[in-house]
Every structure is written in structure tokens, then in C-alpha cells.
Image: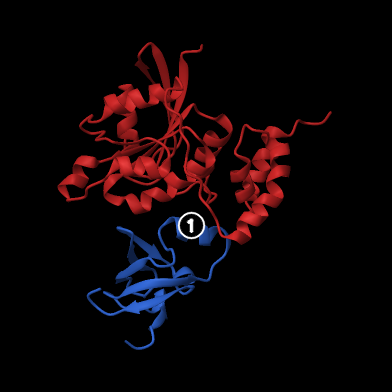
Amino acid sequence: MGKPNIIKLVQGEKGNTIKITSLNLEGVMRRRLLDLGFVVGAHVEVIRKSPLGDPIAYRVSQTTIALRKEESSRIEGELLPNGE
Amino acid sequence: MVNEYRIALAGNPNTGKSTLFNALTGLRQHTGNWAGKTVSLAQGNVEYKHKTFHLIDLPGTYSLFSNSTDEEVARNYIVFEKPDVTLVVLDATSLERNFNLALQVLEMTKNVVICINLIDVAEQQGIQINERLLTNRLGVPVIKISARNKKGFPLLLDTIDRIVTGAIECNPAPMTYPPMIEDKIKLIEPKVRELVGNEISSRWVSLRLLDGDETLLNEISKRLVPEEG
């Protein structure tokens, strides 16, 4: 096992699973994302990207949620090896 | 009237909250499948053991403090209108997501019943839920129901009845925060209690103030501070 590969959610490719390590957002938007399941430790799967790459649909806590770049570029996590 | 009680229904969107409301009250309030469906507060009555339960269907929300209108309506009802019992309806197939709201409600008010709905669907998916363990951990009754098939209603109504008559006492398990936050709560809670009295949980208000919740502060000054003049 090497060093964990930390990426921003927005950098994830379709099919990737990312384990959230930090949310660099404040206020209402942070609260909103926490409420929707984007909490530290949660596993997020990249479901699909729109034709222009924004927004991107993620699967978190059994629900699909699309995030804009403004938000997904502020959430970081560890890229998990495929199949986890 | 002494025999009338207000029962609020809270829950995430799409958990069958309105289905439960309709099944209990016999009303045909339209239930829909999209977020923000319940805009105004639907009300209906249930007669049970010579009592009238006024059911209030709160807007479906994932949370009670993200500052959307729906969430404010639901929060204000639970905190300021103080229903006798708050039913939190959870989707049995998605408990992790749903418990966010349930835990928030447990911090706000004491008399809470957790209704785990869609239990038949969850069981088909192989999900097993130990409601006794949950009841012990949470300190409030947890009941498995299927609103669509009207399963679990006798126990649900009986539990509500026993809470309003005082036969069951709810003791929501307190959520503990890191020492940094607990210290601040200790600091401001006595002053908050002076302001809000025992009507509203001073611990909960303290937490909201530490989170910088201005909408709550405005609501408190609107409702609790007497107008001058």
C-alpha cells in the first residue's frame, strides 16, 4: 500500500470511488452537503459526467446527487482502488 | 380540550410521510414523488381511545437547518409550536441518510417517535432492523411500519397514546460534541436559558447559535421578545 491518492471530487473519473477526507466549504453550502451525505469517511461513486463535464453526478448514501464544479472542487477524498 | 393532542410528522422527502398521514387520517391529500411536494401544512384528525390526535404533515426535508423555506417551516413548527408528539418517518431502505434528520429532531424536542417506514420493502431487500436496540440507544420508541399496507398502525397509535398520557417517558439520548464545543455550550447555555426559558431546549439553541444560525436568532426575537411600546 502506497500513500493514499488524494484527489478532488471533480477530478474523479466515471466509476471511481472516493472516500471523503475534507470539505473546504463553509456556511449553508457546507451544511447542505453534509445533510446530503457528503461527510468525511463517506464513499462517493462517480456516476456520470455531463457532456461539458459540469455538473457531475455522484452516488452517496444510496442516492444520486449532481454537484457543480464550484462544490465538487472543494471536496477532497482518497481515490479507492477499483472494486472497493 | 384536554383530550386533543397535536402530532407532527417529519421526515425526508419520499419516505412515505404523506402516505402515512393519509392512511391514518383517511384524507386524500395528494402524495407525490418529488422533493418539496408538501408545501403547506396539511392537517387531519385521528380518533383513538376517546382522544383526538391532530396530525400535522410537515414539509419533507433532509435536515432542519439548511435555511430553505421548507426546513424553516418544519423547524419552527417543532420548536415554537411544540407539538405534543413528533413522529419522524424514516425510509427503512436508507436509514443512514434518514437518521441525519431523526438525530436533529431528537436534539430539539423530547417527545419523539421514530417510525421506520417501508419495512416490507427493506425486508425484501434482506435488510433487518433491530428496533429494540434502536429504542434503547436513542431513548425514544422506534416502531417499524408499512404505511402502504397499514402495517404497524395499532402499535404506533398505542405508543402515541401512551406518550401523551404519560405512560411512556421519552428520554432522547444526548449527543455529545468535542470538548471545544461542549465548553462553549456550558458558557452560553445559562444565558440562553434566561432568554428562552424551559419551553425550548437551551442546549439546542446554544448549539445553533454556535453554528451562527441567524434565522433562528431572528425567529426567537420575533416570537419570544415582547414588542416595546
The N terminus of chain A is located in which quarter?
bottom left
Residue B140 versus residue B147: which sits nearer the camera? B140
Q: Relative to residue A12, is residue B93 depicted above or below?
A: above
Q: Is residue B32 visible?
A: no
For the point 58% across and 33% down, the residue is B80
Question: Which amino acid lies under the numbered mark 1 shown in the image of this protein?
Answer: Arg
Left or right of residue A14, residue A37 in this image: right
Q: Is residue B78 left or right of residue B42?
A: right
Residue bearing the label numbered 1: A32
x and y, in percent, of residue B35 in the image: 38, 46
Q: Quadrant of residue A26?
A: bottom right
Q: Looking at the picture, how far across and down is residue A31, in whole percent?
A: 51, 58
Report the residue at 38% width, 65% height from top. Answer: A42
Name the quadrant containing residue A2.
bottom left
Say above or below: A72 vs B35. Answer: below
Q: Quadrant of the C terminus of chain A?
A: bottom left
Residue at screen point 61% across, 36% down: B200
**Chain A rendering hue:** blue
Please provide percent x and percent y for residue A53: 36, 75
Residue B13: give x, y in percent of width and height: 37, 45
Colour given to chain B in the rendered image: red
